[in-house]
Amino acid sequence: MKAARSETKPRAAVRRFRVRLPNILGVIGGVIVTTLIVVAIFAPWLAPYDPKERVARPFLPPGEGHVLGTNDVGQDLLSELIVGTRVSLMVGIVAATVALIIGAAIGVLAGYYPKRLGSVLMRGVDVVLILPFLPLLIVLAAYLGRSLLNTIVVIGVLIWAEPARIIRSQVLSLRSRQYVLAARSMGASDRWTIFRHVIPRTALLATGSFVRAISGAILLEASLSFLGLGDPIQKSWGSTLFWAQTRGAFLTPAWQWWVLPPGLLIMAASLGFALIAFALEERIDPRL
């Protein structure tokens, strides 16, 4: 009996840890994201220098007065990364909002009208999902031109398919619930039923998809900027990496302060939103 009890204690501890793990990861992600949002909001006051002005000699290593050193023209890299936080987060959030609006509209319509309209819409979703994503992203960004608005539009119109499929699956379940059938039997219009009973019950699921889309959009913005397809005027983490690669910092000791910090920030932002999305998805009650 004692041996059996001693075996169950570690198992119980493991189970408790698994139950608490989403909350722990969600808190970690929340701390990361909150810190980045605060930095983005107060960027003009936190940046010690104007990131577009030459303030020291080129390729100055980190030291007093310049915590992360300078780039090839003597601009302060810490100031550039602080200001770039605002641009990178803004692109990620706005692009994810565009994707959620498109995905939610298509997902709700495809789920509520699953026959003809739903079949046509889901074939469109399948086409978007099977297309080679990165080449299509590069082609569209190059065709539309280098601007912040075009970057947001390109990312938003290419990442909506996954939220659409997730929301559709939930709407398919909701449309057969008793309260939806009762509303329709009493003569309620489809529009009223969708806005009154369906959309509110997909809000939690849509929130998780939205946060996860932000994580992906930040990575995509950094990828486009690194390839030279982002806005050439705006400072972002991806544009910092682009200029570091263009000026040969990857092959010099300057990579330690010019390449590593923006790469770590991109990873931290994407990870933070991904952890929050994971925690939200684990907390969502499927019994809507």
Image (spheres, rainbow, N blue to C red):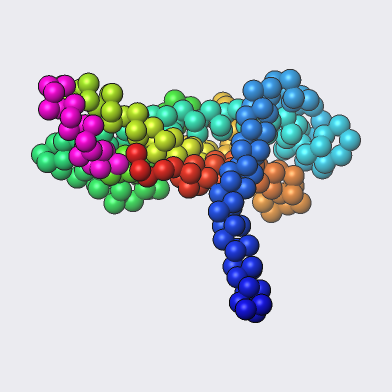
Q: Give the residue drawn at x 82%, y 41%.
A: 62
Residue 244 seen: no
In the rendered image, which quarter contains the N terminus?
bottom right
Q: Give the residue drawn at x 56%, y 26%.
A: 233
Q: Is residue 146 left or right of residue 196?
A: right
Q: Give the residue drawn at x 74%, y 34%.
A: 78
What secondary structure predominates along the stretch shown in magenta?
helix
Marks counted in the figure total 0
> Which segment did they paint magenta?
170-188
Confirm whether the magenta stretch covers residue 183: yes
**x and y, in percent, of residue 264 in the image:** 66, 46
Q: Is residue 249 left or right of residue 149?
A: right
Q: Quadrant of residue 272?
A: top right
Decide which of 135, 87 is in the foreground and name it: 87
In the rendered image, which quarter contains the C terminus?
top left
Residue 26 seen: yes
**x and y, in percent, of residue 113 in the image:** 16, 36
Q: Residue furthest front?
A: 1
**x and y, in percent, of residue 247 in the image:** 65, 43
Q: Give the residue drawn at x 76%, y 36%.
A: 70
Confirm whether the magenta stretch covers residue 218: no
Q: Is residue 34 left or right of residue 214?
A: right
Q: Residue furthest right?
A: 64
